[in-house]
Image (cartoon, rainbow, N blue to C red):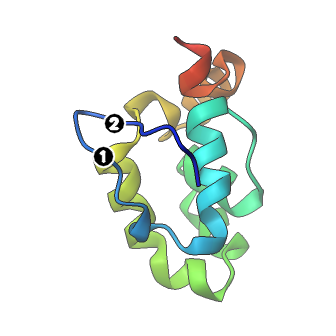
Amino acid sequence: MTDRIYTFGGRVPDWNLIPAHMREGVRMWIEKGVLPGDFLAAFLRNDLKETFVRADDINKQRIGDFVTFFYMYAPINCWGSPENMTEWMKRGGYDGGE
């Protein structure tokens, strides 16, 4: 996925929690603040209804893993509310804050 190893809270992310077809979108969101697709955007905004409506069959079964991944490994200010999502995007993600 990436040669760069990010640690959030001193932990190396467990990318196995994220379905393979979603890892690049999650990585680009965290690293660069690149706006993701509808499912991930709804998740990041903390919009539970839209998260389920937009999820494909795989993601629907793995929403708990997304929560675990973001809770354990992602910067707290990159998800959880529409405001966090907007500010993270403006910032340019993790890389934009360096």
Residue drawn where x is 51% and y is 33% of the image: 78
Residue drawn where x is 66% and y is 43% of the image: 28
Q: How many numbered circles does the render carry?
A: 2
Which residue, as the protein is rendered here, is positioned at the far front? 3
Above-or-below relation of 92 to 14: above
Location of residue 30 (image quadrant): top right
Above-or-below relation of 91 to 66: above
Report helix, strand or loop for mark 2.
Answer: loop
Q: Which mark is residue 7?
A: 2
Give 11 or 92, whichever is nearer the viewer.
11
Q: Is there a contact, CB below 8 Å, between mark 2 and mark 1?
A: yes
Location of residue 39 (image quadrant): bottom right
Residue drawn where x is 73% and y is 49% of the image: 36
Q: Which amino acid does label 1 sit on?
A: Val
Which residue, as the protein is rendered here, is positioned at the far top? 98
Say which residue label 1 marks: 12
Report helix, strand or loop for mark 1.
Answer: loop
Q: In this view, does 68 lie to the left or right of 20?
A: left
Residue drawn where x is 41% and y is 36% of the image: 6
Q: What residue type is labelled 2?
A: Thr
Q: Where is residue 47 in the image (x, y as percent from the top left)?
A: 58, 54
Q: Residues within 10 Å of mark 1 (few under 14, many from 20)?
A: few
Q: Position of residue 4 (x, y in %)?
A: 50, 37
